[in-house]
Structures are given as structure tokens and as C-alpha cells.
Amino acid sequence: MSLKKDLLPTLILQLPIAALIAITLAANPARAVDAVADTAKDSSAEVVKETPKETMFQAGRSYFARVSDRLADSVTGKSDELINRAMEVIGVRYRWDAELPQSGLDGSSFVGYVFKDKLGFLLPRKSTQMSRVGKPITREELQPGDLVFFNTMRLTFSHVGIYVGDNKFIHSPSKGTSVRVDDLGSLYWDKRFDGARRLDGSDNLGDAERQELLNEVNKLKRKSRSL
């Protein structure tokens, strides 16, 4: 009897957890349920404790991944609506660093306005930043709603427009002009064509650029709540 008492603690230590639960269940079912619940609670607490918090920039990336996925679907399914909205802005005068049709639109703000107004999506403010959103495509792959870029200031991706089909694109060209449709095949634009992007849910923006967009999103949210 004494030998059994001495061996019992050692045997218990060597038994797997599942076996201990089975033994406890046979002896006292209610107590076993509590023990299982406590074990699960402890395990859950350890998982939560060990999971690192998402950094600000990781949160930014996941946010834009989710929004961009919805945007890709929207551009694919609503390209006609997007182009129609862009066409409604034809005739609005060019104005540097303006963001609303009432005051005028420059090249990148025109594109940003159309996408935000029609699809509720915020693009970066500068055309050079827009050139890093989505995936690059060839001229032969262009579809309505794709972004087209040009080198108009001896600087790559210094101008942007929206492809509308039939080798045409809509944009706000320069000071003294207004939003209009031009032909990609014309001598001026053909010579300065700098590539195209399709908004497919991807981007290679820097952390600072992504945070800048997140700040703009938060600013818009605060503004809508105050209305």
C-alpha cells in the first residue's frame, strides 16, 4: 500500500492530459467540465498574449488590401458608370492643386475626383504615386477604367488620365485648357506615353504614402460625422 502511494504522483505526472481528463471525468463529471474549461481558457489566454499587435503600417496595408479588392470589382463591373461620370466633368477648367469641379481640376485631381465620387475610393494625390497603385499593363491590354500615364514635364508619370476605350483617354491637360478626351495615337501623346496601370487590389506604395492616405480617410470620416 505504501509503494502505491509513492508511485501514484509519478504516474500522474507521466500521464498525458487527455488521460487525466478521462480519469477525472469518470470520478467527477462536473469537476472535469470545469477543468477542461479552465484549460481552454488558459490556452486561449496564452495565444492572445503571444500574438503581436498589428503595427500602424500593417494595419494600413490590410486596410488598402480590403478596399482595393472591392475597388477591383467595382472598376470591372462599373467601368461604364465610371467613364460616364468622367465625361460629365468635360469642360471643367484646369486649375493647379484644386480638387473640386467647382473650382477646377488638375491632371491628378481630376482622376482622384472621379474615382472618389463614383466608387468612393481614395487614390494618392500625385500622379507619380498613382503610378504605383495596381498592376502595370501594356498598351494592348488597356480596358476602360485603366489609368494611363505620360511624361509631360521631362519627369516620368508626371501626368495621368483615364482610358475610355477606342484608343481614347479623358484628362485635364494643362493650364489654359479644360477636361477633354484625346487620342493616344496622336503625335504628342503617343510620344509621351509612359505606361498604364489596372487597379486590381495591389500597390507598392511606401509606408509614408499609405499613412498619408489613411489620414485622409480619417479626415473624411470625421467630416461626415460632423455633418
Image (spheres, rainbow, N blue to C red):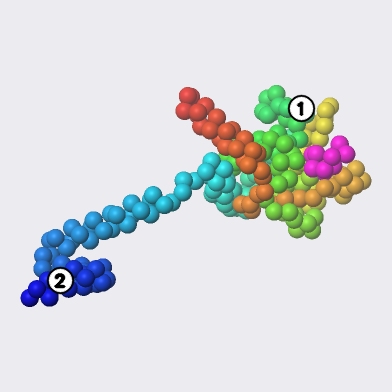
Element on which disc 1 rests: loop
Residue 96's mark? 1
Query: Is residue 41 rendered to the left or right of residue 150?
Result: left
In the rendered structure, which disc, 1 or 2, sits on the residue that comes first in sequence? 2
Q: Which residues are magenta?
A: 150-159
Give the residue displayed 29% in from the left and 54% down from the top: 42
Front residue of 158/23: it is 23
Callout 2 crowding tier (Cα within 10 Å): few <14, some 14–19, many ≥20: few
Q: Nearer the viewer, mark 1 or mark 2?
A: 2
Mark 1 near mark 2, Cβ–Cβ under 8 Å? no
Residue 6's mark? 2
Front residue of 43/139: it is 43
The percent coordinates of residue 31 (x first, y second) are 14, 60
Give the residue displayed 90% in from the left and 47% down from the top: 191
* Amino acid type, label 1: Trp
Residue 95 falls in image quadrant: top right
The percent coordinates of residue 192 (x first, y second) are 87, 45
Query: Is residue 195 rendered to the left or right of residue 224?
Result: right
Give the residue displayed 21% in from the left and 73% down from the top: 11
- Queried whether the magenta region covers residue 153, the answer comes back as yes
* Amino acid type, label 2: Asp
Compared with 220, 23 (above or below) is below
* Residue 90 seen: yes
* Residue 116 seen: no
The percent coordinates of residue 226 (x first, y second) are 47, 24
Give the residue displayed 80% in from the left and 55% down from the top: 139
- Queried whether the magenta region covers residue 175, the answer comes back as no
The percent coordinates of residue 218 (x first, y second) are 53, 33
Callout 1 crowding tier (Cα within 10 Å): few <14, some 14–19, many ≥20: some
